[in-house]
Amino acid sequence: MSNAELIATDPGWIILVKGLLVFSTCVVLTLLAIWAERRIVARMQERPGPNRVGPLGLLQSLSDGVKLALKEDLIPAAADKIIFILAPIISATTCFMAFAVIPVTGQVSLFGHQTVMQMTDIPVGVLYVLAVASVGVYGIVLAGWSSGSTYPLLGGLRSSAQVISYEVAMGLSLVSVFIYSGSMSTSEIVAAQGQWWFAVVLFPSFVIYAISMVGETNRAPFDLAEAEGELVGGFHTEYSSLKFALFFLAEYVNIVGVSALATTLFLGGYHAPPGLGFTENWLGGWFTAIWFFAKVAAFFFLFVWLRGTLPRMRYDQFMQFGWKVLIPVSLFWILVVATLRLLSQQGTSRTGLLIFSGIVVAIVMFVNVAFDNAKKKKKNTPRPTLSKPDFAVPELPNKGSDRV
Amino acid sequence: MSDQLEPKASKDVDVNNVEFTPVVNEGPSSLPAQLKGFWLTFRTMFKKTLAVEYPEVKAPTQERFHGRHQLNRHPDGLEKCIGCELCAWACPADAIYVEGADNTDENRMSPGERYGKVYQINYLRCVFCGLCIEACPTRALTMTNEYELADNSRSSLIFEKEDLLAPLRAGMLMPPHPMYPEADHHTYYRGEVPEAHPSQEVNK
């Protein structure tokens, strides 16, 4: 019985329980994630981090949340009130929705009912995740616009441009996963990784996805939407109290969300790492959830590590990187994967595949060398000396004036 | 208007004729060099943290740290402060208020003629510059290393004389009491008074 068929037999109350579990897990994970991030970044800076509230400071984010909730809720006079209130709600609701299609465990028994920990399994599950993530951007854009203030507007615009650009690269990196697994349903993609994880088979896609998921979630070094030095707080500058807390929640649930998607698509989802397959039957199958969350945690550590290491990028460099590097590279990679897939489906011999791979490698090397040469040539050409042009030019601003 | 305030004309500054120096742009560094940065932050995670767990652990200050003031005593217990107000005059923040009064034979707080009757330091104004300590002619006013001066009301941060006076140590007697036998304020000033003499015990 496939996962989709198994889920289809769920009675209503099981679906309700799953929904509650997804929600509570996400909220608890957010609290833990904020705590973990602060502790890890602190260690990277030779500080201990929050260690006062509760054991090891574990309750710090909970107390911060309570503090936020008890604060005064301000709505600026210039704000568009309805949209101002709606924006954080959009952000915070859409981020949870992605989890509906993420398979967290293999087949388990939930209150005596055989099922898998996945709310629903739709044939276009991954597209659904991308779609929901795009709707989530509206929260940020509308928050920036409705605040009636300059910095939030700039932050919101930046954020929308950023998420749109990186969603293209993200979507393209997923195409090769679809080609390879022959499906867009999350559970079938996980099943297709029984032998080899796609992180190994489709390594370039994995790298592109990992980069673009950081851009997608507005995280350092791509956190230009909330660059403190330039935009105060970015889109959430005018927000306070619970509405701000909702944005905060949305940001972290999004991080966990893209990490969970990465786990599902590239790291074999809830499956144990190769060689540890026997652990999947422990605790009546529930042990697979531990593998799943361990992989998500690894991705989260990557996020924190990036934040602790890299400085924020300049906006134009960031856009150039997205459009001029990530998208062309992923397009080329899709071409290669699609051709390889077609060749192997048509029963081309191993030599044929090897020859094709050789050609691809040769092209990559040629392009690389050509780029290097062009760079050297540009470096070595002397700068043209500026001479007075023979056509009319406007006067330089300071010429002919005594005042500076 | 002086000449210096006049803006210079662009032809004098010659901003449009600066020698051209090409900017050297090395481009992105190599992958190993970038990974080195990641290794650095990863390695730092396992280092000992530098933070001091403050309320539980109190790191000692530097020896000459400017902390709360203290009004010192002579070895027999008489106050060193003579109520001269030089500290109050020296204070750039106007944080010190002193009222002097005359010593009498029945009520002697310090050697010599005068003593500080009212002595207040307002720690909301004090900038801990130490000019009062430099001004004090008798070393009556010095600073301790105590820095925990936070409080939650304005009035409690105005320290009175009782708050600032140094405690009585061994051999000291609580003033008022007469001076050491056959000593005058010069003897006190030179530090020749060792400790309280039995004849100074008038209160008991």
Image: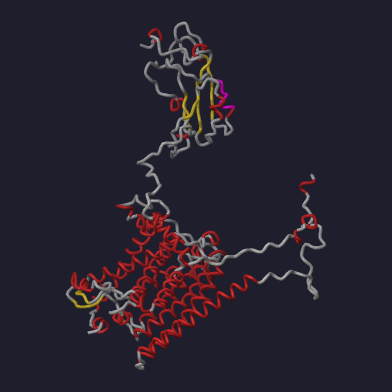
Count of numbered circles on the image: 0
Q: Nearer the viewer, residue A162 or B203?
A: A162
Residue A339 drawn at (x, y percent):
42, 88
Q: How is the image coloured?
A: secondary structure
In the rendered image, which quarter contains the N terminus of chain A? bottom left
- Image quadrant in which you'd find residue B9: bottom right
Residue in the picture at 50% in, 72% down: A162
Q: In the displayed image of the protein, which residue is found farthest to the top?
A: B182
Residue A282 drawn at (x, y percent):
19, 70
- The segment highlighted magenta reads B84-89
Q: In the displayed image of the protein, which residue is found farthest to the left?
A: A112
Residue B168 drawn at (x, y percent):
39, 21
The chief SS type of the magenta part is helix
User: Relative to residue B197, is residue B189 drawn left or right?
Assistant: right
User: Relative to residue A148, is residue A21 drawn left or right?
Assistant: left
Q: Nearer the viewer, residue A140 or A12?
A: A140
- Residue B36 visible within the image: yes
Residue B171 versus residue A255 in the image, above or below: above
User: Relative to residue B115, is residue A2 drawn left or right?
Assistant: left
Residue A135 drawn at (x, y percent):
44, 76
Q: In the displayed image of the protein, which residue is found farthest to the bottom?
A: A346
Residue B86 belongs to the span the image colors magenta: yes
- Residue A97 visible within the image: no
Residue A384 belongs to the span the image colors magenta: no
Q: Nearer the viewer, residue B164 or A258?
A: A258
